[in-house]
Image: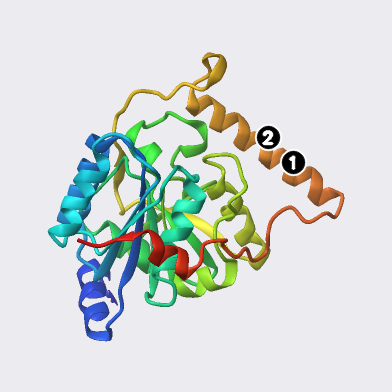
Amino acid sequence: MVGTSGFDPESLVVQAKAAGKKVAITMVTFNRWSLTQQSLVSIFENTFLPHTLTLVDNGSWDDTRERIKELRRAGKIDRLVLLPENRGIAVGKNFGLKASEGQAAWYCCIDNDIKVESYWLSYLCYVSTLPGLGIIGSNVEGFSRPGGARHHKAIYWKTVGGVVLDRCPNPGGLYVVSAATLTKIGYFVERTLYGMEDSEWFMRQKHYGLRSAYVRNARCVTLPSEEFMMPYGVSYGAFKMATHDAMRAKVRAARKRGEATTFPHYQTTATLQDVEKYTWSP
C-alpha cells in the first residue's frame, strides 16, 4: 500500500477488494436536488474503493424523493431511507451508520453539497488507519474558498507516505472513520444545534486520545449555493461560526471546573427496526 514512492491509492483499492473490505457511505438529503445530483454524480465517477451508498432523506418536499427513488431503482444507491419528517442531520447520519453497523471497515458521512475528486476516499481511508488518528476529513471549505473562513485555512502538519496532512480544527461536512474508531467513540449526539453534531463528535474523540487531520490529497469542494439566512438577517455561516466558538469556550470552561463536556460513547436512538421501517425498496 505504501511503496518506496509513497502511498498508492489504487493499491488500497486492490487490497480492499481482495480482503472483502468496503466503505459504508452515508449522505443525508433535504431538498436542494440540483446540489445533491452533482454530489452523487461525482461520487459515482470518482469512488473506486468497494463501498455501499446509503441515502437518508429528511422529509424533502421538492422533487428530491422521486429523483433518489429513480436512482435506487437503477441500482445506483444501495439503501434508501425515507424519514417522514426532518428529524435533524444527526439523526439522519445515525440512521445511515446504523443501517451498515458492523458491515464495513470504514464509515463515511458526506454532505449533499460536496463534490469529490478522483481517489478521494482511498486517501481518507488510508489516513484513518494511522496510529493516533480518528476522524479524518477533507478541507472542503479551504479548497472552495482559499483564505476564507478562518477555521478552514490550510495549516501544514506533516507528510506521511507522500500524503500531506493539515491541522484540522473540525472535519465539517465530509469525514471518514475506521470501524475501530466508530466502535470506540459511538454515534452522533442527536440533541445538539443543527450543524454542531460534528463539532461534538470531534471533541469527543479527544476523550480517547485521538485527533483529526485534513488530507490535502483528498481534494473535494463545497458546491456554490445561495447563503441560507437565519432569523434576524444572520447568515447560516456566521451563525455556525459563532455557535462553534461559543461551544469551544463552554467546553474549555467546563474542563477547568473538572466537569464532563461530551458524551464518551453515545448510542443512537435509531434501531435496526427503525431503519427497516423507513427503508424504501423498488
SS assignment at label 1: helix
- CB-based contact (under 8 Å), mark 2 and mark 1: yes
Taking the spot 36% from the left edge, 40% from the top edge, the residue there is 30
Q: Position of residue 154 (x, y in %)?
A: 43, 42
Q: Quadrant of the C terminus?
A: bottom left
- How many angstroms separate mark 2 from mark 1 (CA)? 6 Å
Q: Please identify the quarter of the rendering in which residue 104 is found.
A: bottom left
Identify the disc placed on residue 250.
1
Which residue reaches farthest bottom? 19
Q: Please identify the quarter of the rendering in which residue 129 is found.
A: bottom left
Q: Is residue 88 left or right of residue 71?
A: right
Circle 2 crowding by C-alpha within 10 Å: few under 14, some 14–19, many from 20 = few
Taking the spot 21% from the left edge, 44% from the top edge, the residue there is 66
Taking the spot 47% from the left edge, 38% from the top edge, the residue there is 152
Q: Please identify the quarter of the rendering in which residue 65 is found.
A: top left
Q: Is residue 13 above or below residue 136?
A: below
- Callout 2, which amino acid? Ala
Residue 170 shows in the view? yes
Q: Quadrant of the N terminus?
A: bottom left
Circle 1 crowding by C-alpha within 10 Å: few under 14, some 14–19, many from 20 = few
Q: Position of residue 82 (x, y in %)?
A: 35, 52
Q: Is residue 16 left or right of residue 158?
A: left
SS assignment at label 2: helix
Residue on which disc 2 sits: 246
Q: Is residue 22 above or below residue 200?
A: below
- Callout 1, which amino acid? Lys
Q: Position of residue 212 (x, y in %)?
A: 51, 57
